Amino acid sequence: MAKTVANAMINAKAGGSIIFIASMSGSIVNYPQNQCGYNASKAGVIQLTRNLSAEWARFNIRVNSISPGYMDTALNRVMDLDSQKAVWIDHTPQKRLGKIDDLNGAAVFLASEASSFMTGTNITIDGGYTVW
Amino acid sequence: MAQGLLESGISGLVVMDQNQALGEESVAQLSTQTGVDIRFYKTDVRDEAATKEAIDNAVSHFGTPHILIHSAGVAE
């Protein structure tokens, strides 16, 4: 998908901003649940972000990623996960799950010229989970 | 995130998702709220040909894209 959109941007000589939603799971290992497939794929997203940022910088296309922590979304709104959620919240300095709007600011920032010298970076939005 | 971008003044938006009902509902809601031209394409990002076709269609309608957000996710 990135290839097709980037091609359109390149052909139009317009530049642009591509944002990959990775996950803190691309950098740390979650606890207590095992999810190696998901985590490895998210690590792949982060590395792909860096590679594409280098390949496409000359076309004025910036490529960055956002790594959310535990968010209160449909992916996690399953009763089976309630006891795990208590553990996740306990391990988060801010003691809560992320709200769906918590990524908006970073997305708009990365999409705009406010981040014009940023490419190949990863912004972690996790309530501090990865600092412990 | 789509809402945040709309609030910051983008002129067109394409939403691509596997879930048709949810996607169409979200797009209708956002479009009514903001008056911006928004399209929804039911897409499975694992299908390369179909994804490319949806994007080509979007580009022919809206013109050159400036922002792309990849947010596909799977729960095990």
Image (cartoon, grey):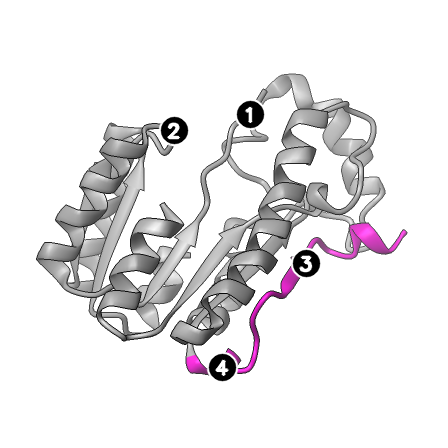
Q: Which residue occupies 33% across, 69% down?
A: B7
**4 and 2 marks in contact (CB < 8 Å):** no
- For the residues beneath circles 3 and 2, the answer to whether they share a chain is no
Say whether residue A97 is magenta. no
Q: Amino acid at mark 3?
A: Thr
The residue indicated by pointer 4 is: A116
Residue projecting furthest to the right: A132
- The answer, for residue B25, to whether it is visible in the render is no
**1 and 4 marks in contact (CB < 8 Å):** no
Quarter-of-image position of residue A72: top right
Inter-mark Cα distance, 4 to 2: 31 Å
Say whether residue A123 is magenta. yes
Query: Dot 2: what SS?
Result: loop
Q: Which residue occupies 25% across, 60% down?
A: A8
Q: Position of residue A68 (x, y in %)?
A: 63, 50
- For the residues beneath circles 1 and 4, the answer to whether they share a chain is no
Residue projecting furthest to the top: A80
Query: Dot 1: what SS?
Result: loop
State the mark number for residue B37: none
Q: Which residues are magenta?
A: A113-132
State the mark number for residue B46: 2
Protein chain holding label 2:
B
**3 and 2 marks in contact (CB < 8 Å):** no
- For the residues beneath circles 2 and 1, the answer to whether they share a chain is yes
Mark 1 crowd level (few <14, some 14–19, many ≥20, 10 Å Cα): few
The residue indicated by pointer 1 is: B75
